[in-house]
């Protein structure tokens, strides 16, 4: 279930001083696919171009849903800080990578793997053939997108590491992600901007 909170009360002493306003907060919890409408609604509740904090504890879901969230974060110019509070796996890694700042704890876990093709419908041979062609192309595009979202060059050692993790279906700890330079490792103490 996704959750969104933002203070709606106006403090007269802070009027006209937006820098002291706490950033909006969105929680991406659970399966992306099951919560797609709610997640989109919550991101639309964040003012374009403003700061927000997105908390992640998700096993992933549909790659199209993940791509939609990435698109909304980027096109709306959200200055998002992503924080993995538990799990951020599979398709959930893409919106996390789209955040301008990425924070993890030592106990954070991220699962990297190639996209999986799944269909619960009976389809004809032509549709299956077209889906197979599309899926092969989509898999390559999404792998490249993930590397670009992390802000690294396609031919870098970090890009090779991400590809290796995907090929190995690798569970990556927060420490490993920080060591690779893809996130900042934080301890379990109050974040400075939340204490203000």
Image (tube, rainbow, N blue to C red):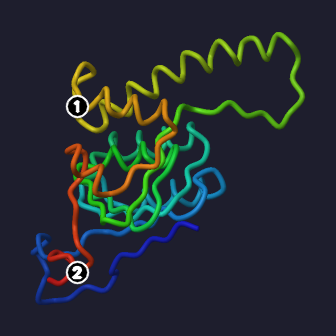
User: Which mark, by number, is residue 152?
Assistant: 1
Q: Residues within 10 Å of mark 2 (few under 14, many from 20)?
A: few
Residue located at (48% from left, 38% from top): 67
- The Cα–Cα distance between marks 2 and 1, rounded to whole angstroms, is 29 Å
- Above or below: residue 172 compared with residue 118: below
Residue located at (42% from left, 36% from top): 165
Residue 195 place in picture, x, y as percent: 18, 84
Q: Nearer the viewer, residue 54 or 147?
A: 147
Q: Nearer the viewer, residue 24 or 178?
A: 178
Q: Nearer the viewer, residue 162 or 148?
A: 162
User: Which mark sits nearer the N-terminus, 2 or 1?
Assistant: 1
Residue 132 place in picture, x, y as percent: 69, 16
User: Which mark, by number, is residue 189?
Assistant: 2
Q: Is residue 118 left or right of residue 159?
A: right
Q: Quadrant of the C terminus?
A: bottom left
Residue located at (52% from left, 65% from top): 29
**Helix, strand or loop for disc 2:** loop
């Amino acid at each position: 279930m996704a959750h969104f909170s933002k203070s709606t009360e106006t403090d007269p002493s802070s009027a006209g001083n937006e820098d002291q306003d706490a950033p909006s907060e969105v929680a991406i919890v659970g399966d992306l696919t099951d919560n797609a409408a709610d997640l989109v609604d919550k991101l639309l509740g964040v003012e374009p171009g403003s700061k927000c904090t997105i908390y992640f504890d998700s096993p992933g879901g549909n790659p199209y849903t993940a791509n939609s969230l990435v698109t909304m974060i980027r096109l709306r110019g959200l200055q998002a800080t992503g924080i993995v509070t538990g799990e951020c796996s599979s398709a959930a890694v893409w919106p996390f990578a789209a955040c301008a700042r990425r924070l993890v704890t030592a106990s954070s876990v991220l699962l990297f793997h190639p996209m999986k093709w799944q269909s619960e419908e009976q389809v004809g041979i032509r549709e299956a053939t077209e889906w197979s062609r599309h899926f092969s192309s989509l898999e390559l595009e999404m792998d490249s997108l993930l590397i670009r979202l992390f802000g690294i060059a396609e031919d870098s050692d970090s890009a090779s590491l991400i590809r290796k993790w995907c090929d190995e279906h690798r569970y990556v700890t927060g420490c490993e992600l920080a060591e690779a330079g893809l996130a900042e490792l934080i301890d379990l103490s109050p974040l400075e901007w939340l204490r203000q």
